[in-house]
Structure formats: C-alpha cells, structure tokens
Image (tube, rainbow, N blue to C red):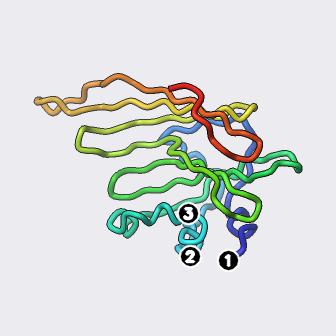
Amino acid sequence: MDFKEFLRRFPKRQLPLALTSESRLDIQGEHDMADIPLDMVQQFLSFELQDPEEAYYAEYLPCIHIEQPQNANFEAVIYWTASIKGDRFRLCTFQKNGKLIDQLDFAGTHYEDSGLTYSVGTIDADWKATVRSGLKALNSDAAFLQKGGLELVYQIDVVGNMELVTA
C-alpha cells in the first residue's frame, strides 16, 4: 500500500487548529470522509490493533493532513477513531516513507472504570501541541463531579518527534 494514497484520504488544513470531541461533526460536514480501510490501518496505524476486542468494534476516519512547508522532514495527520471505550482524535507523525514516528491522543472522550475523560487539543503555528483533559467521575448519586484537570504541552520538532515540554 502506498503512503501517498493513505495521505490523500486526509483533507489538508493549516495550523493553528483546535479539536474537541464534537469536532468530528464539523469536519464531516466539510469533507466527505470514508473509513480508513483495514489494510491501511494494519500498515500505517498498527498500534491501534493491539487490543483485539477494542479493534474489532473500532472505526477510523481520516480528518486532517496538516499542511507543511515543502522542506518539512515529516508528515502529520489527525484521524478520529471510535470504539467501545469511547472516541478520540489521534495525532500521528510519520517519516516521508510512511514509518510512524510518534502518536498522541489529542482530543475526545474516553470511558474508564473511574469515569469519563474529556480532552481538547490545540496545535499553534509553531507546532506546539497542547492537550487539556478532565475526568468526570460518578458519585454515589450517579451525578457527575468534576475531578481536577491536566494540561500536557508537547513541542513537535523538525523531524516529527513529540517531546513533552510541561505537564
């Protein structure tokens, strides 16, 4: 499978950008998105298939191919995936030949025993990616309580590595 064909499935967008769990609907309204075929998931996103139960029920939609200068040393895409554990946007960087460099849960809703984790992600024009997350836990009355928050800031370098800058 050709990496360029994989990239063509993703509509191009420029930085800066911001995504929430609801952004998929906006992106789908702008672009006709078809699922990423399983053979492409196996080849370029194989880390997604480590949990067979979750992978069986998952779907993967191409969302964004981040535009870069011609001399960039990597490609960056964001796709949306939904499974029995929730939905999320994932940011991935690749070498020009399609080899995965790094990946990051970027935005979305994830279900865990402790509650629901909500995340929003932004990438500014200088490739600083920020992920803000909060946990909503169920109390004994089955109402949601906000439990703290977390902000992680990554700097994406010129070869596509995502280095954690602050936590």
Q: How far separated are the C-alphas under marks 3 and 2?
A: 10 Å
Amino acid type at image mark 3: Leu
Residue that badge 2 annotates: 39
Farthest-out residue, left: 140
When asked about the image quadrant of residue 51, the answer is bottom left
Q: Give residue 130's position: percent from left, percent from top.
A: 58, 31
Q: Name which residue lies at 66% across and 44% down.
A: 161
**In this picture, residue 21 sits left or right of residue 8:** left
Amino acid type at image mark 1: Met
- Identify the secondary structure beneath mark 2: helix
Give the mark, 1 or 2, whose residue is nearer the N terminus.
Answer: 1
The numbered dot on residue 1 is 1
Q: Toward the viewer: 72 or 19?
A: 72
When asked about the image quadrant of residue 56, the answer is bottom left
Q: Name which residue lies at 77% across and 42% down.
A: 158
Q: Give residue 8's position: percent from left, percent from top.
A: 73, 64
Pointers 1 and 2 in contact (CB under 8 A)?
Answer: yes
**In this picture, residue 2 sits left or right of residue 84:** right
Pointers 3 and 2 in contact (CB under 8 A)?
Answer: no
Give the mark, 3 or 2, whose residue is nearer the N terminus.
Answer: 2
Amino acid type at image mark 2: Asp
Q: Give residue 122's position: percent from left, percent from top.
A: 60, 33
Q: Residues within 10 Å of mark 2 (few under 14, many from 20)?
A: few
Residue that badge 3 annotates: 45
Give the mark, 3 or 1, whose residue is nearer the N terminus.
Answer: 1
Q: Name which residue lies at 31% across and 46% down.
A: 111
Q: Residues within 10 Å of mark 1 (few under 14, many from 20)?
A: few
The numbered dot on residue 12 is none
Q: How far separated are the C-alphas under marks 1 and 2?
A: 8 Å
- Identify the secondary structure beneath mark 1: loop
